[in-house]
Amino acid sequence: MHSDRAMVSPKATSVANRPRLKYIVAAAQTSTAEKMLQFYPELRGLEIERGAPLIGGYSPAADSLAVATDDPGVLTHELAHAVNLRRSTLYRKLLQLTGALSKINRRVATTSADLVQNLVQDDAKRNDLLNTMSGVSAMLAAPRLMEELNASSSALRWLGDDNAAADKMRSALSAYVRQALGPIAVYQTAKSEFDPARR
């Protein structure tokens, strides 16, 4: 999955210097990367770096892509992110804003749910508030979640018959979805068993 962190490496390549690509990434990654670099004009001038603190990520701030794994699915997925994020500055800023707010929401979800449970005594009002918090969480998570789904879908098409890489990507995507929707589960679990029909 992509990261907004700047990733610096002494080795970098660009579309203008494609022959160096094989020295940056593993042989298994080179073929797919070459095809994507040639197919998408949005990737023109993109730097691809070998070595990163994460498994892999496209950094909009540095406008570079770094990989620290030989898994071709990671590079393909991150190239798909680069295509999408380089197409529109507005879209990129929307993802950065909602991503930052969603990250804060994930950190405070449990505490927020506890406060609502303790401070709002009326069952109906408490459930309404928790439903609203769930809705806001979904709105914040949706843009980035859709971007991850889009990048994964694109990467799967480029990977073709590489089932091993595809399986790893699906597993990573599943974990991302669970993380993104975590606050909704927290808020919904915090709701009382209040049934308005019994009132």
Image (cartoon, rainbow, N blue to C red):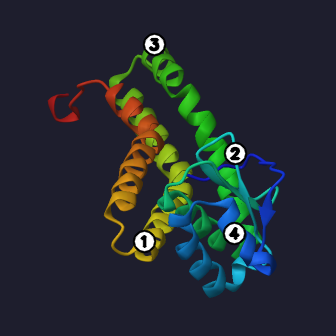
Quick check: 131 above or below 59? above
Q: Residue at x 15, y 29 (%)?
A: 198
Q: Nearer the viewer, residue 28 or 137?
A: 28
Residue count near mark 3 (Cα–Cα under 10 Å), binned few <14, some 14–19, many ≥20 = few
Residue 124, image x, y percentages: 34, 30
From the image, tell me which residue sits under label 4.
21
On the picture, is 148 further left or further right than 90? left
Dot label at residue 159:
1
The residue mark sitting in front, 3 or 4, is 4
Q: Which x, y percent locates residue 139? A: 52, 53
Q: Which mark is residue 52?
A: 2
Is label 1 in a helix, a strand or a loop?
helix
Query: Can you see residue 88?
Result: no
Please state which of the two labelled residues, at mark 1 or mark 3, is closer to the viewer. Answer: 1
Residue toward you, 196 or 187: 187
Quarter residue 11 falls in: bottom right
Distance, label 1 to label 3, CA atoms, is 50 Å
- Closer to us: 81 or 117: 81
Whole-angstrom CA distance, mark 1 to mark 2, is 22 Å
Q: Amino acid at mark 3?
A: Asn
Mark 1 / mark 2, whichever is N-terminal: 2
Near mark 4 (Cα within 10 A), the count class, few <14, some 14-19 or many ≥20, is many
Numbered badge on residue 118: 3
In the foreground, 47 or 84: 47
Residue at image coords 69%, 69%: 21
Q: Amino acid at mark 1?
A: Leu
N-term mark: 3 or 2: 2
Residue 190 sits in quarter: top left
